[in-house]
Image (cartoon, coloured by chain):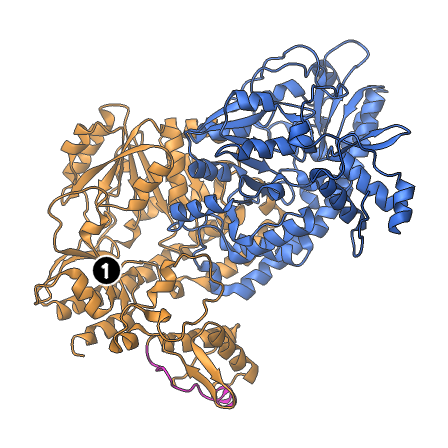
Chain colours: A orange, B blue
Amino acid sequence: MPLYDLNGKNKYYTLYCDIRGDILRGKLKSGERLPAKRELAKDLGVSVVTVQLAYEQLLAEGYVTSRERSGYFVESVLPQENIRTGQKERGFSSGKPPAPAGGRGRLQTEAEGSAEYTADFVKGATPAKLFPFSVWAKLTRAVLADCGEHLLERVPCDGDAELKAEIAAYLYRSRGVDADPRYVVIGAGAEYLYGVIVQLIGRDKLYAVENPGYATISGTYALNGARFAPVTVREEGVSMGELKKINADVLHISLSHQFPTGVITPAYSRSRLIEWALGADRYVIEDDYDSEFRLSGRPLQSLFSLCPERVIYMNTFSKTLAPSMRMGYMVLPPALYEKFLRLFSSSANVVPLFEQKTLAAMLKDGYFERHLSRLKKYYRGIRRLTLETLEKLFPGCEIYDTQGGPHLLAKLSDGNGGDINDAAERLGVRVKRLSDYLIAPSDGLQGYAVFNYSGVTEEQLTALSLKQHS
Amino acid sequence: MPLYDLNGKNKYYTLYCDIRGDILRGKLKSGERLPAKRELAKDLGVSVVTVQLAYEQLLAEGYVTSRERSGYFVESVLPQENIRTGQKERGFSSGKPPAPAGGRGRLQTEAEGSAEYTADFVKGATPAKLFPFSVWAKLTRAVLADCGEHLLERVPCDGDAELKAEIAAYLYRSRGVDADPRYVVIGAGAEYLYGVIVQLIGRDKLYAVENPGYATISGTYALNGARFAPVTVREEGVSMGELKKINADVLHISLSHQFPTGVITPAYSRSRLIEWALGADRYVIEDDYDSEFRLSGRPLQSLFSLCPERVIYMNTFSKTLAPSMRMGYMVLPPALYEKFLRLFSSSANVVPLFEQKTLAAMLKDGYFERHLSRLKKYYRGIRRLTLETLEKLFPGCEIYDTQGGPHLLAKLSDGNGGDINDAAERLGVRVKRLSDYLIAPSDGLQGYAVFNYSGVTEEQLTALSLKQHS
């Protein structure tokens, strides 16, 4: 039984998290008995009630069972254990299923299924433990105390002026983007902002989207009733030929680190994009998703900086802070900003002022950038481990990685001529083919798998690298 | 007359429900006289006041009419009995067609210029001082302490399960709406939800909107690329004839207290709406905006309760809590909820979990309803003062007020034959004509002004009533 460090408040919750972690990492094995409550309480210097609460939480969530007069025993929750008994991929649903703590609907969410894998290279969630929760809580309390009833005021349609200014200042510091704070518009996440863009530019326009790319982007255009068409992405960026051929009005693009290819649009392609946009009444949506995670060197120059009249710059905080932060922003060209005001001046902004003020404080006081440095340092470590693990499992496999964000491509050869799915299944890994991200048929992506390592942990990678030998 | 069993609390409401049931089931026929109040009270062993309240509720909802000295008579509310020709001439509609005032967009923003008026009867903002700020701050701190890092978790697309359950429970307690918590969807305010509805039902459908009505509603449909068409609202609700003639697929309606007319859709019109919706693959959006502010009697029965398969029930907290609270909800028919999950299951909810948990706590612990009572008490006072002031300034002016929310209609005659604008300018009052709220030309609303008294203060009304003498 490891020692748990229980400083701070919510001791029982910390203890619960630690024990749960040990169960999920396999440190506590199925069938193992948890220490007696009194004993553990004494060891840790906490009250018996604290231990009792932690055990009850584990019990409620199905991590342990309780046997009368004997104590608490670890349940079999790990996929590896199930694979050994020939019940691969059944995970939680084989054996005795634990009741999800407050489950919803019929849908299995991404989070639920994750525990089934040794490592999940699809999900891609920033580990919650890296979020500077205590800073955020402190700033939240400070905002509540400082702003008081001002927090109840209606937020102008484009967002809180203070946050707009802080975002503009941050963009300048971190990205060299010289955005006029006036033209910054705050919105409830990326998909919400895509919808607003359609309302600004028009749903009769044709939106070109990257192929392969995020299905959510094209899906959101479709949901908003706009026409969209795929354009092929290769090492040199989107195909200009296709873009001209389909006669698109708008291009939605991630130049700094395209998902899933990782392509960084080279400078000469950028110039051609500007030329294309200026050639007619066209717009480029520079979706700068993931750009903060460039792991080496300076951030890449933004297209927006080159042509602020024709480029909409946008990004969110879901990846850098937490997926629960439904907060994004865009910097609009002046003409579109004027239209935004005409359409929405009678509406209030959809993001609560409380969140806007807290984020403004995080940006102003440098907390956000310190958090980002820590996150990048963490991802550098995970990336290194991912590469080592891939090399170990698939010696000599080809890697395509521009270090622009927490995902890379690997051409797998498992030595048996098997395909990616076989290898993944054998290893208990969740991974997708590059071609799985195609939104329309396209050639030449065979053999590549996309490793999004933002959601995997050191422990998982260590467990994975040991698989070869088992 | 059947015997009604009136055990338990809310006797008058039970009695009202029972009689209403008998009317809807045809046990009490159109034209039939309800028993005298004293008589029924004696029979049932309840007070006369109880019967009186039940009868008044039935009267307000149009199930019965009252004839002086004769008693209460059952209205023809069943669809098959429905051939009514506007016999109700006591309302606000008569005369020639005024033209619509023009849409939104170019409009002066509501917030501007308020300080310039003695009293602003247009703006309509809940006074910030009435918001239970200290309660909210306390709950905010409690949520932060209790939920801790859980607040960072991704919220399922339809919202936090706890808030969904609390909203369903609140709807049942306050409105008698028996909504399955599963089908509650949380969103960032009314306009956001209108957009989602368009995505669910389709922008190729024709959305009928009330005329006169909120320009924001039709404007939001237009912004979302959906077709909309106005249908006339009069004392008996929307014109069924027009609704059928334009062949609408969806009707967006406020039944409990329409803005700006204040019309309460009577029971027979409700039945016809259900019949209309069931007649084809049609939906009614029951926008229950302002329904909490019914200043006398119980809330009116919801259309949703009558037909949960064809009615989307929706409301927000912007009016009851604060305009900065961008939080609304809708209860979807099961089929639309399934579609919602299909479309959005990969998206996170746009409202921060922090706000959702705080509101859930407000609902759970009864704070919200206590706040609402205080607010209603306050509005009763402001309404009385508004009426007194109007009577003083415009002796004998006609009032149309169904007491359903913080606005009423007054036909102004300032004694000089001048029109509303002249009177308003002379008095330093901001007020709009009923016809200013037309979204398409319509007949017979001359002379009426809309007094939204939710944003005026006692002091302002007192100052206004002194104006006459200056």
Position above or below: A406 against A463: above
Task: Say which residue label 1 marks.
Answer: A431
Residue A469: x and y in percent read 16, 78
Residue A23 in the image, given as x and y percentages of width and height = 37, 77
Percent position of residue B448, x then y = 71, 19
Whether residue A50 is in magenta: the answer is no
Question: Residue B89: x percent and y percent?
Answer: 75, 18
Tell me the crowding category of disc 1: few under 14, some 14 to 19, or many 20 or more residues within 10 angstroms, Cα based. many
**Relative to B235, A391 lies left or right:** left
What amino acid does circle 1 point to? Val
Above or below, A408 relative to B196: below
Q: Residue at x 91, y 29 (%)?
A: B69
- Quarter assignment of residue A379: bottom left
The stretch drawn in magenta includes residue A31: yes
Chief secondary structure of the magenta span?
loop
Which stretch is magenta? A26-43
Query: Which corner quadrant holds the N terminus of chain A?
Result: bottom left
Between B378 and A364, the one nearer to me in the picture: B378
